[in-house]
Image (cartoon, rainbow, N blue to C red):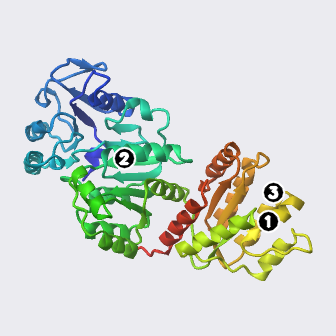
Amino acid sequence: MLDCFFNPKSLAIIGASNNINKGGYHIIKNITAGYRGKIYPVNKSYTEILGLPCYPDVASIPENIDLAIYFIPSKELPETVNECAKKGVKGIIIESGGFNEAGEEGAKLQKLALENAAKAGIRLWGPNCMGFIDANRTYVFSFINSAVWSDILKGGNVSLIVQSGMLSAGFLLHALQEGIMGVSKVCSIGNKCDIDESDILEYMINDSETEVIACYLESLVDGRRFTNLAKKTKKPVIVLMGGRSQEGAKAAQSHTASLSGNYCVSSGAFKQVGIIEVFDPAELTDMARAFSKKMLCHPGGGSAILTFSGGAGTITTDLMEDCGLPLAKLSSKTLDSIAELFPPWNKPDHPLDLWIAIERHGYEKVFKRSFDAIMNDPAVDSIIFHSYATPLIGSGFFKELFELVRKYEKPVVIWAAGRKDFADNLRAMAEIAGFPAYRELGRCVTVLKGIKSHFTKKPTN
């Protein structure tokens, strides 16, 4: 039903421009960078844009069109919808503002455009949005500056549904530069006059290229439909909800004309159906990146802590208790196995402070042996691994550890601590091997909680 947006055979850019300072220029520049279908710029001021014939209006386009991108003043939209109907257009992405969020006149324009589209069987995406990006195909149907994304956009398995326009660009850029993660689709849905978050969620659930769904929303058009869809899928659905506070709800209404509703009701429903709720953009990115690693988990035990510092182990234990994550009760067999690495006068306890053993046997030997012992312990269902940054650790070390993760299906989250340049390098090696890795302990604990809560969920399909 939404295929015309995600896989159009032809598209028109209404408001395309040759002026590099205009959003209409960046839309067509972005589209020509990766899209290989038929492209029809529309602007009465030009006869050609970027080597493509430019048409004065939609009616002048010689063929029918699947998709139109609208980037001209809001007052033109109702009539443009009628023109698009005559060209067989199935969907319009409205990236302009000036509709419901702009007051009474804007609301009238939006209502009339929606009525015209309904008569013609046209679906409307937006308005007041950044459009759509498919990183796997290099489809950038957006006015995002063409210089911003070209060197960092990479495909992946995470799809984003973002109600805010500019924040969707912020999410995308943060996700691509914070750790090792690619994206599948990024959908900025704006005012949601027609297509809403549930429509996109349903598409993503059925999309073979999407394995993780992350959302920033300021309202739910149909909360029951959204939660029912999330309940039935095995794919993790992560939601950052804007407008939780009274003042935040007011800000959301002025921003995208969103009526946030009762946040407490929404949050309670999220918990019931297994939606993972997060509370800031970095946490949304953290969680999405962790799930993109495709680690499995069988909750029921506790989390183990491997560390080089007793103090760090204590802090992690406190953070886990704050989040409701139990510390694993290691068996005597596990502790005895690890004790062989320690001097006779010192015995390991949990959290496992391994520094004395590391001084005797070296970093890699101690952590590999300890990992193997802990992975074999049935009381352990997950691990937080404190990795001190040193140039002595190579990428092969993390690859070997990740083989244990695959074998035992126990997720591991890594804290990369130490000198920044060493820690950044260590974190990159860990991420490439398959681990989610962070520079802050709290982020590790929050992510592990999200992973365990998702695998506790029992999908209905």
- Residue 30 at x, y = what percent? 36, 31
SS category of the residue bearing label 2: helix
Q: Measure how far apart labels 3 and 1 are at the Cα level.
A: 9 Å
Check disc 3 and report the residue beneath it.
363
- Residue 5 at x, y = what percent? 28, 45
Q: Residue at x 55, y 56 (%)?
A: 293
Which amino acid does the dot numbered 2 rest on?
Ser
> Where 436 falls versus 33 (above or below)?
below
- Residue 16 at x, y = what percent? 24, 28
Is tag 2's residue or tag 1's residue first in the polypeptide sequence? 2
Q: Pick whichever, 91 or 217, lies toward us.
A: 217
Q: Residue 209: in sight, yes or no?
A: no
- Seen in the image, is 388 located left or right of residue 412? right
- Seen in the image, is 424 located left or right of residue 169? right
Check disc 1 and report the residue beneath it.
354
Check disc 2 and report the residue beneath it.
168
Q: Are marks 3 and 1 in contact (CB under 8 Å)?
A: no
